[in-house]
């Protein structure tokens, strides 16, 4: 009984560390887009510098997942819990990388006049952050319904991405001088779209964790 209790506590600790990593990733996304909107190179640099901690956490959690599998030989749902955690941190790490990509663009164009007010990109970022938050909440609560509702927000993110793409394309066609910055902003919107996709991946991991069935939530 004591061994099982210790194992359950280890799983809870693992979950808490995954949530800590998720919180850092949410913050990185928010600060990267804020740095872009405010043209704040210093804030952008803090996002870039903070990525090292997220990478360290990923490696630490990954190592603990592998050791749990090797030493505890978990079965059924316990194995799915560890496997889901392993996959979730990989998605979180990729989100953090995209936040860094956005921060690098924010730093690069910090001293340039913006070609247009940033309205839809912050909206995209807010939606993507909400998806990340709800995906992690669904993971903690093992809530399949929340995971599925969260994934449906990806359609709104995709719609905003397409809208931004069309608008920036018009800017580039009308004034070739905007091409460089417009291309950077297109990349930003693409990174946010990918962050939403990674949140959807976490939702799919939650469904598998609870049901044992793989389901594509983008269907």
Image (cartoon, rainbow, N blue to C red):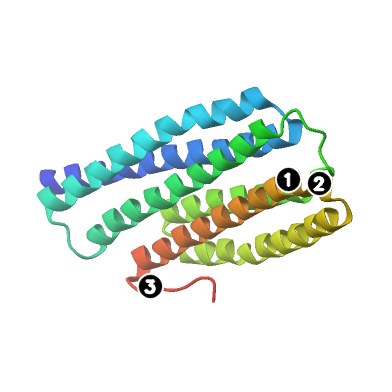
Q: Are marks 3 and 2 in contact (CB under 8 Å)?
A: no
Q: For residue 140, which numbered disc appears in the image?
A: none
In this image, 52 relative to 188: left or right? left
Contact (Cβ within 8 Å) of mark 1 with mark 2: yes
Residue receiving disc 2: 178
Circle 3 Cα neighbour tier, 10 Å, few/some/many (<14 / 14–19 / ≥20): few
Q: CA distance from mark 3 to mark 2?
A: 44 Å
Q: Position of residue 32 (x, y in %)?
A: 62, 36
The correct choice, above or below, for 179 with respect to 40 in the image is below
Q: Which residue is mark 1?
A: 180
**What residue is shown with label 3?**
214
Within-10-Å neighbours for mark 1: few <14, some 14–19, many 20+: few
Q: Nearer the viewer, residue 104 or 18?
A: 104
Instruction: Find numbered disc 2 in the image and state the secondary structure of the residue it sits on.
Output: helix
- Residue 143 shows in the view: no
- Work out whether mark 3 precedes mark 1 in sequence or the reverse, and give the earlier one: 1
Q: Secondary structure at mark 3?
A: loop
Front-lying residue, 3 or 115 = 115
Q: Please tell me which residue is depicted at 55% across the width and 53% down the height of the picture.
A: 195
Q: Residue at x 64, y 38 (%)?
A: 105
Residue at figure coordinates x 72%, y 64% from the top left? 162
Quadrant containing the C terminus in the rendered view: bottom right
Task: State how far apart marks 1 and 2 are (Cα).
Answer: 6 Å
Q: Earlier in the sequence, mark 3 or mark 2?
A: 2
Instruction: Describe residue 117's horizontal placement relative to residue 8 as left or right.
Output: right
Q: Residue lying farthest top?
A: 42
């Amino acid at each position: 009984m004591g061994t099982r209790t210790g194992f359950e506590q280890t799983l809870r600790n693992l979950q808490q560390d995954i949530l800590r990593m998720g919180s850092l990733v949410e913050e990185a996304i928010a600060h990267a887009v804020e740095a872009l909107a405010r043209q704040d190179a210093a804030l952008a640099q803090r996002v870039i510098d903070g990525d090292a901690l997220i990478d360290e956490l990923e490696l630490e959690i990954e190592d603990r997942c592998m050791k749990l599998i090797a030493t505890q030989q978990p079965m059924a749902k316990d194995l799915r819990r560890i496997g889901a955690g392993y996959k979730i941190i990989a998605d979180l790490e990729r989100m953090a990388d995209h936040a860094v990509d956005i921060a690098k663009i924010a730093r690069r164009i910090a001293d340039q006049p913006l070609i247009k007010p940033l309205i839809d990109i912050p909206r995209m970022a807010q939606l993507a952050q909400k998806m990340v938050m709800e995906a992690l909440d669904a993971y903690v609560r093992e809530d399949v319904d929340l995971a599925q509702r969260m994934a449906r927000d990806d359609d709104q993110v995709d719609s905003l991405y397409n809208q931004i793409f069309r608008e920036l394309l018009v800017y580039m066609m009308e004034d070739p001088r905007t091409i460089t910055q417009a291309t950077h902003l297109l990349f930003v919107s693409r990174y946010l779209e990918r962050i939403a996709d990674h949140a959807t991946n976490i939702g799919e991991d939650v469904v598998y964790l609870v049901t044992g069935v793989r389901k594509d939530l983008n269907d």
